[in-house]
Amino acid sequence: MTTTLAIPDMSCGHCRASIQSALAPLPGVSAIRFDAEARTAEIDGTVPPETLIRTLAEIGFPASLTR
């Protein structure tokens, strides 16, 4: 399953590194891809979107599902 999140405050490489560090250790995350221009992240795995969104909010990056 791939979840795509809009992360409007993701503006630089440091932001992407922080997001990667927060999400990668979650059980069930198999890959993360970023689109810096669109400010989105695609997360492959079995983690529920609510968990991904909550994890990002905890580190200061509000996120929402895209469609």
Image (spheres, rainbow, N blue to C red):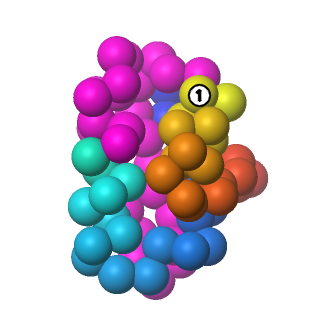
- The secondary element bearing badge 1 is classed as helix
Q: Quadrant of residue 33?
A: bottom left
Vertical position of residue 3 compared to residue 65: above or below: above
Q: Quadrant of residue 22?
A: top left
Q: Is residue 63 left or right of residue 20?
A: right
Q: Give the residues drawn in magenta, as a range.
A: 22-48
Tell me residue 28's x, y (percent).
36, 17
Residue that numbered label 1 is attached to: 51
Tell me residue 57's x, y (percent).
60, 49
Count of picture labels: 1
Vertical position of residue 11 compared to residue 56: above or below: below
Vertical position of residue 67 compared to residue 50: above or below: below
Tell me residue 37's x, y (percent).
46, 83
Determine if the magenta segment contains residue 20. no
Tell me residue 49's x, y (percent).
62, 32
Determine if the magenta segment contains residue 26. yes
At x 26% / y 61%, what residue is drawn? 17
Residue type marked 1: Thr
Which is more toward the observer, 44 or 50? 50
At x 56% / y 60%, what residue is drawn? 61
At x 64% / y 55%, what residue is drawn? 63
Vertical position of residue 4 compared to residue 12: above or below: above
Residue 33 seen in render: no
Q: Is residue 11 left or right of residue 57?
A: left
Q: Is residue 45 left or right of residue 25?
A: right
At x 50% / y 21%, what residue is drawn? 47
Which is more toward the observer, 22 or 35? 22
Residue 40 seen in render: yes
